[in-house]
Amino acid sequence: MPMNHCAIITTMKTKLIKIIQTLEDNNQTISFAESCTGGRIAAAFTAISGVSSVFNGSCVTYSNDIKHLWLGVSSEVLDDFGAVSSECVEDMLKGISQKAQSDYAIAVSGIAGPDGGTESKPVGTVYIGILTIQDIIVKKYLFNGDREAIQRLATDTAISLLEKNLIKF
């Protein structure tokens, strides 16, 4: 039986509170570099009271020029692999964590559609990365749905990926 909308919101809020509490308990911080999610990850976190104790900041870096200028994504990565790639997301993670001086980071880049897809990178292709205090994890996803659904799924998946990889002391 599918979850209703209220149950999904409650589950996500519970995840966010758990993440924030774990970061706070360990005196750690987080930042975000978002492209196709357009700031939705930052919005989800900032909807929770008390997040300011762990949230350093966020960038919505939609264009390749801004990815390069603000986050230090190399021109070679953008030329050779494109913005929708694991290499780009890894550079985004490193760039935002360095700029924001955070212990953890989430970065997302993808094609939310309805335009922009190709045979090798169809609409719904999204790379989601997590930088932890021990590792960098980047995963490729192919989400189905319209633009709003893809953005929502990418946001929820990024938060869930962080929750699974949050290192607790």
Image: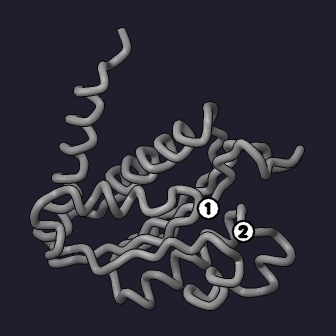
Image quadrant occupied by the C terminus: bottom left
Residue 103: image quadrant is: bottom left
Q: Establish if 111 lies above or below 136.
A: above
Q: CA distance from mark 2 to mark 1?
A: 7 Å
Residue 165 lies in quadrant: bottom left
Please state which amino acid type lies under the numbered disc 2. Answer: Ala
Q: Residue at x 11, y 61 (%)?
A: 49
Residue 139 left/right relative to 18 = right
Image coordinates of residue 22 in percent, x first then y, are: 17, 62
Q: Which residue is mark 2?
A: 83
For the residues bearing labels 2 and 1, Cβ distance under 8 angstroms:
yes
Report whether residue 133 is seen: no
Q: Is residue 83 visible?
A: yes
Residue at 63%, 45% (x, y): give it.
141
What residue is drawn where x is 44% and y is 89%? 98
Q: Secondary structure at mark 1?
A: strand
Q: Is residue 129 above or below residue 53?
A: above
- The residue where tag 1 is placed is 109
Give the total of numbered labels.
2
